[in-house]
Amino acid sequence: MTARALLTNPLALAAGAIALLLAIGEALSPGFAQGDQIVRLTTVAAILGIVAAGQNLVILGGREGIDLSVGPMVSLGAVIAGNVMAGQDAAILPAVLAACAVTFAIGLVNGLGVTLVRIPPLVMTLGMTAIIQGGLVVYSQGVPSGNAAPALMAFVNRPLLFGLPGILLVWAVIALALGFVLRCTAFGLGVYAIGANERAAMLVGLPVARIRCLLYGFSGLFAGLAGVCVIGYTGSSFISVGDQYVLSSIIAVVIGGTSLAGGAGGYLGTVLGALALVLLQSVLTTLQLETYGRQMIFGLTLLVLMLLYGRQARLRV
């Protein structure tokens, strides 16, 4: 493979970035690339990867699809789960179902606004962001709300199987399921079809509006599930806990090679993108870079990737 091909191959770039960041981290802080530390970083990447799964679906669906409401929905999922659980192991399943059901419904509302009312996705999801954030402030009065059950915290943070926390197993299942759905089912092929050419998809009889509504619904569902994982990771929730996942989920998708024009890409690249982004954040933290500096670098990373891949490039993963 030529150097030019490598520079435009998302999987090669993401894998190379992961290897380079591990080497830099190890040089800056010996032990950075050791097993326990890698598991901890991968646990953090799993939460981002779950959020990015929904973002990936929305972007694949085309029509400038993007979901800026994933951050508040992560926060909402965490608050709902924490209050339903209230620290009780027996309430974990109802908490997961409640968080995912509410955020899935909100995602469907986003989808209906985009498809039926024809509100641009950027405007629709930005408006939903304000609504959710305002509701969380009113509900919690700015005070951390809800507590994780001990069993959930153990599932997310402690080794469960083969020395890996349960959240990594959940992430693996999500990755396999999404890969299968996108490549081997009529729904998945329909997602690529409407993302590549919506008009042609309509002419062959695909239910474009229904598919796009479901994509936004699944984006909400994955954000809610990530919120459950967040409260399991931290033990408690607050109303801005999901803010960090809005830009990072988009960057993870782009790192993985999914075209922002839609219709091209896949979740495997997004998994690598989430890992690379978390490693980058950890290296920057090791360098003691301030938060604003990290945000500037994340934004620059997104712009550089867009220049490398080309906004309209059809990159197949």
Image (spheres, rainbow, N blue to C red):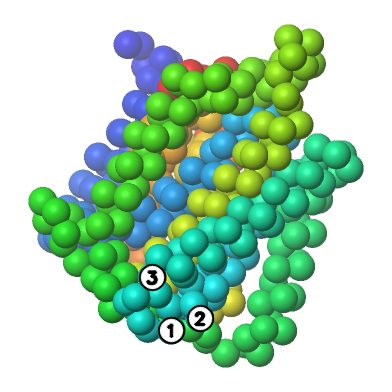
Name the N-terminal-most of marks 3 and 2.
2
**10 Å neighbourhood of mark 1: few (<14), some, or many (≥20)?**
some
Which residue is at a point 82% across and 46% down the rendered structure image? 113
Residue 93: percent from the left, percent from the top?
40, 65
What whole-number distance in Å separates the C-alpha atoms at marks 3 and 2? Answer: 11 Å
Q: Quadrant of the C terminus?
A: top left
Name the N-terminal-most of marks 1 and 3.
1
Identify which residue, 152 or 12, lies in the foreground.
Answer: 152
Residue 287: percent from the left, percent from the top?
34, 65
Q: Secondary structure at mark 2?
A: helix
Identify which residue, 209 or 38, lies in the foreground.
Answer: 209
**10 Å neighbourhood of mark 3: few (<14), some, or many (≥20)?**
many
* Pointers 3 and 2 in contact (C-beta within 8 Å): no
Residue 212: percent from the left, percent from the top?
69, 34
Q: Work out whether 292 lies above or below 110.
A: below
Residue 55: percent from the left, percent from the top?
57, 44
Question: Along the horizontal axis of the image, is 180 left or right of 153?
Answer: right
What whole-number distance in Å separates the C-alpha atoms at marks 1 and 3? Answer: 9 Å
Which residue is at a point 49% across and 61% down the rendered structure image? 97
Q: Which residue is mark 3?
A: 92
Query: In the image, which disc is placed on residue 83?
Result: 2
Q: Secondary structure at mark 1?
A: loop
Q: Secondary structure at mark 3?
A: helix
Residue 166, quarter of the rendered image: bottom left
Which residue is at a point 81% across and 37% down the rendered structure image? 115
Question: Along the horizontal axis of the image, is 266 left or right of 45?
Answer: right
Amino acid type of the residue tagged 1 in the rendering = Ala
Amino acid type of the residue tagged 2 in the rendering = Asn
* Pointers 1 and 2 in contact (C-beta within 8 Å): yes
Q: Can I make out residue 296 in this image?
A: no
Identify which residue, 51 or 149, lies in the foreground.
Answer: 149
Q: Which residue is mark 1?
A: 86
